[in-house]
């Protein structure tokens, strides 16, 4: 009887603690499966198409060749990727800081919105590739010009989404806080910022997808190391498969950063997902 009772408790209690992770993993797999299947089909079509057309590697390498070269050059690619990742993260942090400051200013001060917002929009019409050489002339060949390029590319979506999120806060909640005697900074920290978090993360996710590209763009102008330099040198040497391996590295870093931001968003705004 003792053994029967022990097994019964285990059978009843264990699934309650163990089923939640398995269900979450199963749900995640179900969500990712369509994208994985489509990606595999596209890669298969690419592989078959290159071989059927008889294209040379310098024209368009097959995915299998890209994987082969990438694995063979993994140490070199990792070294360049580390330099690109460092610039991307610093630039993204600067973009978030500047973008959040402008977003708060625009949402809190109507005069600033009328004066600053049009200039911010105008700044996005200037091709970054055109001002990147000027930044190199002003600040030299160090990391600073590349960080500025990343910040210029990434700050705008953070600014716009945070400003929209702050302006979209329920005015009734703000009135209640003020009626209870809350000070402006309390209204901001207790009501407006939490309510604007989903919008802020929407802008941050967009900025995250841009930051690595911005770093590569800065490296194309002038840099001793980085995936941008790696790809330029590979293309110049006619090593197209190696250049594609660099492109794959850029994509993997971007996906990894985006996934981290998505995880952080779900941790901080779980209430938003549950409500949706």
Image: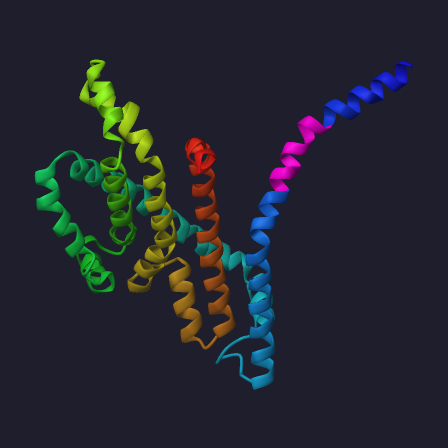
Q: Is residue 232 magenta?
A: no
Q: Nearer the viewer, residue 77 or 54?
A: 54
Describe residue 173's horizontal placement relative to residue 114 as left or right: right
Residue 5 x %, y %: 85, 16
Q: Height in image: 99 above or below 213? A: above
The quarter in which the C terminus is drawn is top left
Q: Residue furthest bottom?
A: 54
Q: Height in image: 26 above or below 187? A: below
Q: Residue furthest front?
A: 172
Q: In which quarter of the view is residue 200 placed? A: top left
Q: What residue lies at 25% left-to-right and 42% top-to-bottom? A: 164
Describe residue 98's horizontal placement relative to residue 61 as left or right: left
The quarter in which the N terminus is drawn is top right
Q: What residue lies at 24% left-to-right and 44% top-to-bottom? A: 159
Describe residue 21's horizontal placement relative to residue 192 as left or right: right
Q: Is residue 21 magenta?
A: yes
Q: In which quarter of the view is residue 212 placed? A: bottom left
Number of marks in picture = 0
Q: Nearer the viewer, residue 220 or 264?
A: 264
Q: Height in image: 215 above or below 61? A: above
Q: Residue furthest right?
A: 1
Q: What residue lies at 11% left-to-right and 38% top-to-bottom? A: 110
Residue 104 x %, y %: 21, 35
Residue 103 x %, y %: 22, 40
- Residue 31: tell me if it is visible: yes
Q: Magenta part of the protein: which range?
A: 15-25
Q: In which quarter of the view is residue 7 placed? A: top right
Characterize the magenta stretch by its predominant secondary structure.
Answer: helix
- Residue 72: tell me if it is visible: no
Q: Height in image: 254 above or below 2? A: below
Coloring applied to the structure: rainbow
Residue 190 x %, y %: 30, 23
């Amino acid at each position: 009887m003792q053994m029967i009772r022990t097994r019964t408790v285990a059978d009843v209690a264990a699934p309650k603690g163990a089923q939640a992770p398995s269900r979450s993993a199963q749900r995640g797999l179900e969500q990712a499966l369509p994208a994985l299947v489509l990606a595999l089909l596209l890669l298969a079509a690419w592989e078959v198409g290159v071989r059927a057309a008889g294209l040379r590697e310098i024209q368009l390498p097959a995915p299998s060749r890209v994987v082969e070269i990438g694995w063979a050059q993994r140490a070199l690619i990792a070294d360049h990727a580390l330099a690109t990742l460092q610039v991307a993260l610093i630039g993204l942090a600067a973009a978030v800081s500047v973008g959040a400051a402008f977003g708060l200013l625009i949402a809190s001060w109507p005069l600033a919105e009328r004066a600053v917002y049009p200039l911010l929009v105008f700044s996005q019409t200037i091709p970054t590739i055109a001002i990147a050489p000027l930044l190199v002339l002003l600040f030299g060949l160090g990391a600073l010009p590349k960080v500025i390029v990343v910040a210029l590319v990434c700050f705008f979506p953070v600014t716009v989404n945070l400003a929209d999120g702050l302006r979209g806060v329920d005015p009734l909640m703000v009135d209640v806080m003020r009626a209870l005697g809350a000070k402006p900074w309390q209204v901001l920290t207790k009501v407006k910022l939490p309510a604007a978090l989903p919008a802020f993360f929407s802008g941050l996710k967009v900025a995250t997808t841009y930051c690595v590209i911005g770093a590569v763009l800065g490296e194309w102008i002038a840099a001793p190391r980085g995936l941008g330099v790696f790809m330029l040198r590979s293309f110049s040497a006619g090593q197209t498969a190696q250049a594609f391996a660099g492109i794959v590295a850029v994509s993997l870093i971007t996906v990894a950063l985006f996934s981290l931001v998505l995880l952080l968003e779900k941790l901080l705004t779980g209430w938003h997902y549950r409500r949706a």
